[in-house]
Image (cartoon, grey):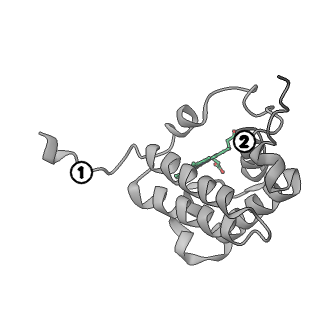
Amino acid sequence: MNAAAPPSPYARIGGESAVRAIVTRFYDLLEEDKAYADLRTVHAADLGPVRHGLTRFLTGWLGGPRDWFERGPCIMSLHRAFPITPALADQWAMAMTCAIAAQEDIDPAIADSMTQALGHMARGMINFGLDDSAAA
Ligand code: HEM
């Protein structure tokens, strides 16, 4: 048996140009749509480095070249440095949902999986502003 590995999600969505288009749309939304104003504010004035970082992260996460993952801390540890409220996580997930949905010709099954997985990841980063008084 020598079955070829199935193509990665990265290959199936169109590789680097598709990932770059989604990330460009995501940060353009943060810059242009007031619905994401709070999320924009927690980022640095220059979005250039994070545009590059998210492109490389998604590339590896989708099964493409893994240079981002070989570089350092995991994505969850890295975000512990930022106060992430439920509202900020929702803004992140909503902007990413829109950025993916606007990608022409994307396989709808992959678009759906990406949207759901990244939404869960963003909400898993919440580390601030959760009312835990009910647990006391
Ligand atoms: C699945 C969810 C998320 C992913 C995949 C993600 C991904 C990334 C990546 C790859 C970077 C660049 C880090 C680097 O390459 O060194 C970054 C930076 C950052 N992220 Fe996220 N992120 C997510 C959710 C969030 C949320 C919910 C917030 C809300 C506050 C947030 C705030 C930031 C901030 C403030 C930076 C630093 C960049 C800057 O200062 O401009 N992220 N994120």
Bin the neighbour count of mark 2 within 10 Å (Cα to Cα): few under 14, some 14-19, many 20 and up: some
Q: Secondary structure at mark 2?
A: helix
Name the front one of labels 1 and 2. Answer: 2
Q: Earlier in the sequence, mark 1 or mark 2?
A: 2
Vertical position of residue 100 compared to residue 76: above or below: below
The residue that disc 1 covers is: 131
Q: Amino acid at mark 1?
A: Asp
Vertical position of residue 51 compared to residue 76: above or below: below
Residue at x 79%, y 39% (from the top left corner): 6
Residue at x 88%, y 57% (from the top left corner): 17
Quarter of the image for residue 39 reads: bottom right
- In the image: residue 110, left or right of residue 132: right
Vertical position of residue 72 compared to residue 34: above or below: above
In the image shown, does 105 or 72 lie closer to the viewer? 105
- In the image: residue 84, left or right of residue 118: left
Residue at x 51%, y 64% (from the top left corner): 91
Q: Position of residue 59 (x, y in %)?
A: 78, 44
The residue that disc 2 covers is: 57
Residue farthest to the top, as pictured: 1
In the image shown, does 15 or 131 lie closer to the viewer? 15
